[in-house]
Image: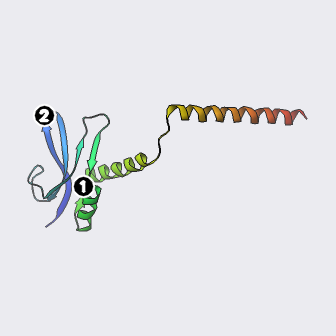
Amino acid sequence: MAVKIRLARHGSKKRPYYRVVVADSRTRRDGRPIEEVGRYNPMTTPKTISLDLEKIADWQSKGAQLTDAVAALVKAANEGEKAAAAPKKSKKQLAKEAEEAARKAEEEAAAAAEATEE
């Protein structure tokens, strides 16, 4: 039995909403899944990706294959975790760093001008 981790479409007409499911490859797209391992909503801004990466890794270790669409979602979810783990700087901190960089550049330019005069 070939098992795939794929998208199952839900939602109304022109308002898609997907569930990431583990299913036998021979079943219909929206047929009965073995297990639901995540959700994906492309209609929100930003797009909502909610995956249980541990379950996905467990199913992959058992031989389940990711579809191309789910592989892209897993990659995006992994990148999102890395970005969320990085500390975010406030606008004040970014402005302060920009001012310091500008001040250092001015000082270096002034020092270079004095060195060329001598």
Under mark 2, the amino acid is: Lys
Image position, residue 53 (x, y; %): 29, 56
- Residue 72 vertical placement versus 62 (above, below): above
In space, the residues marked 2 and 1 are separated at their CA atoms by 23 Å
Q: Which mark is residue 98?
A: none
Q: Earlier in the sequence, mark 2 or mark 1?
A: 2
- Residue 8 vertical placement versus 57 (above, below): above
Q: Are marks 2 and 1 in contact (CB under 8 Å)?
A: no
Image position, residue 112 (x, y; %): 80, 36
Of 57 and 63, the residue lying toward us:
57
In this picture, residue 44 sits left or right of residue 8: right
In this picture, residue 101 sits left or right of residue 2: right
Which quadrant does the C terminus fall into? top right
Under mark 1, the amino acid is: Thr
Q: According to the image, label 1 marks what residue?
A: 67
The picture quadrant where one finds residue 62 is bottom left
Image position, residue 98 (x, y; %): 60, 33
Of 75 and 81, the residue lying toward us:
81
Residue occupying image coordinates x 75% and y 34%: 107
The picture quadrant where one finds residue 57 is bottom left
* Mark 1 element type: loop
Number of numbered labels in the structure image: 2
Q: According to the image, label 2 marks what residue?
A: 13
* Mark 2 element type: loop
**Crowding at mark 2 (Cα within 10 Å: few <14, some 14-19, many 20+):** few
What colour scheme has been applied to the protein in the rendered image?
rainbow
Image position, residue 28 (x, y; %): 9, 53
Residue occupying image coordinates x 19% and y 40%: 17
Which quadrant does the N terminus fall into? bottom left
**Crowding at mark 1 (Cα within 10 Å: few <14, some 14-19, many 20+):** few
